[in-house]
Image: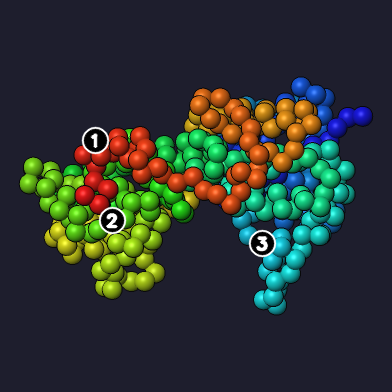
């Protein structure tokens, strides 16, 4: 019998998801003669009756799809199946309905593309289902445990670096401090990589507690050396650092960390500081070649694992090759920036200030 496998994308979108879906469908058909079913709108599609799902015809999944950002299947980062928000404000466990939806598809295996939170939910959702499940890591934050790279990260870094390249001449022309806020809910991977690649003067991340006074002193040193501008990169979660929350009384509470920082730097340095918040711009671009390659390699390996009878595992990129690891060693954990690692050492060696010394 021809096997049927399913694939869904869950959590926030990012570049490279379509390349992952394409790789799964092509490998399933050309490698094993299997049919691939695409589940729409992530786990939300499992609540529809009939389930929101479409057959994926490999003949229609050409190279142009791999170049597209986002996910043509749709995704969701809303509505925990085990505490689903209802119209009356209450919460309801709707995981049973989703399980019924999965069973109605008559699948022989499921591949879920998601970040740490999505993979944890999907793994829990699969427990009562006799259905092999393989996870594929994707997140621009690059904080999934047990993998060096996640789909979407490379593109996000490229966008942030390009933004720095564009902010530098504006800052130099007007003697401004240019603050760039990048995504990074719990980790500073994007901020660190972009700061190094884009030649920033300061980078602030949640892993390194920082002080405004140290940043101000660093900018003052730059100005004494005839520098008329400065580039500052800040991760969106950097304000969670205890020493980074000081002196915010005069800043509107609804301001982002980048806007708060620019306000504080203007007051402390006397220089005009402007903030740029990239936000979702980092998610929706055409994927870089690296993200397309990673997505393809991980998608192929996910199908091969199902063919080998494996389950409850995640494909990963480690030491320049594709491996697979138990999902139980991934969920509930996060990979943050190593404060003793190569990225931090490189930044310090280049004279980039991290706000702590």
Residue 305 appears anywhere in the view: yes
Name the one closer to the observer, 185 or 273: 185
Are the residues tagged 1 and 3 within 8 Å (C-beta)?
Answer: no
Tell us which disc is closer to us: 3 or 2.
Answer: 2
Give the class, few, some or many, for how many residues have Cα within 10 Å of label 3's Cα (few <14, many ≥20).
some
Residue 166, percent across and down? 30, 41
Q: CA distance from mark 3 to mark 2?
A: 35 Å
| Residue 180, disc | none
> What residue would you read off at disc 1?
349
Q: CA distance from mark 2 to mark 1?
A: 18 Å
Q: Quadrant of residue 82?
A: bottom right
Name the one closer to the observer, 183 or 305: 305
Q: How was the colour assigned to the protein in this rendering?
A: rainbow
Q: Callout 1: helix, strand or loop? A: helix
Q: What's the residue at 51%, 35% (across, down)?
A: 149
N-term-proximal mark, 3 vs 2: 3
N-term-proximal mark, 2 vs 1: 2
Give the class, few, some or many, for how many residues have Cα within 10 Å of label 2's Cα (few <14, many ≥20).
many
| Residue 79, disc | 3
Residue 217, percent across and down? 15, 53
Q: Quadrant of residue 296?
A: top right
Q: What's the residue at 32%, 65% (across, down)?
A: 245
Residue 230, percent across and down? 20, 47
> What residue would you read off at disc 2?
210
Q: What's the residue at 85%, 55% (across, down)?
A: 100
Q: What's the residue at 36%, 44% (across, down)?
A: 339
Q: Is residue 298 above or below residue 141?
A: above
Tell us which disc is closer to us: 1 or 3.
Answer: 1
Locate residue 62 relative to residue 115 in the image: left or right: right
């Amino acid at each position: 019998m021809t096997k049927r496998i399913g694939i869904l994308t869950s959590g926030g979108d990012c570049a490279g998801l379509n390349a992952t879906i394409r790789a799964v469908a092509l490998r399933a058909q050309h490698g094993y003669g299997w049919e691939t079913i695409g589940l729409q709108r992530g786990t939300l599609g499992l609540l529809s009756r009939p389930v929101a799902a479409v057959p994926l015809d490999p003949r229609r999944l050409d190279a142009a799809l791999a170049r597209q950002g986002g996910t043509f299947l749709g995704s969701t980062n809303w509505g925990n199946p085990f505490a689903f928000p209802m119209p009356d404000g209450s919460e309801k466990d709707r995981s049973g309905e989703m399980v019924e939806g999965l069973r109605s598809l008559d699948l022989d295996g499921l591949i879920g593309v998601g970040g740490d939170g999505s993979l944890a939910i999907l793994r829990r959702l699969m427990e009562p289902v006799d259905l092999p499940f393989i996870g594929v890591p994707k997140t621009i934050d690059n904080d999934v445990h047990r993998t060096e790279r996640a789909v979407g990260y490379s593109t996000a870094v490229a966008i942030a670096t390009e933004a720095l390249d564009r902010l530098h001449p504006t800052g130099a022309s007007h003697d401004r401090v240019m603050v760039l806020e990048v995504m990074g809910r719990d980790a500073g991977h994007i901020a660190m990589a972009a700061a190094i690649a884009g030649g920033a003067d300061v980078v602030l991340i949640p892993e390194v507690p920082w002080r405004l006074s140290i940043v101000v002193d660093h900018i003052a040193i730059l100005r004494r050396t005839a520098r008329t501008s400065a580039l500052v990169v800040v991760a969106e979660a950097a304000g969670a650092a205890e020493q980074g929350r000081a002196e915010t009384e005069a800043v509107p509470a609804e301001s982002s960390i980048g806007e708060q920082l620019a306000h504080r730097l203007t007051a402390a340095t006397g220089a005009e500081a402007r903030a740029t918040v990239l936000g979702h711009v980092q998610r929706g671009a055409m994927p870089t070649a690296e993200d397309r390659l990673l997505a393809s390699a991980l998608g192929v390996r996910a199908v091969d694992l199902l063919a080998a009878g494996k389950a409850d595992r995640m494909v990963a990129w480690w030491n320049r090759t594709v491996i697979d690891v138990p999902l139980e060693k991934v969920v509930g954990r996060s990979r943050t920036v190593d404060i003793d690692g190569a990225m931090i050492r490189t930044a310090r060696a280049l004279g980039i200030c991290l706000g702590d010394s």
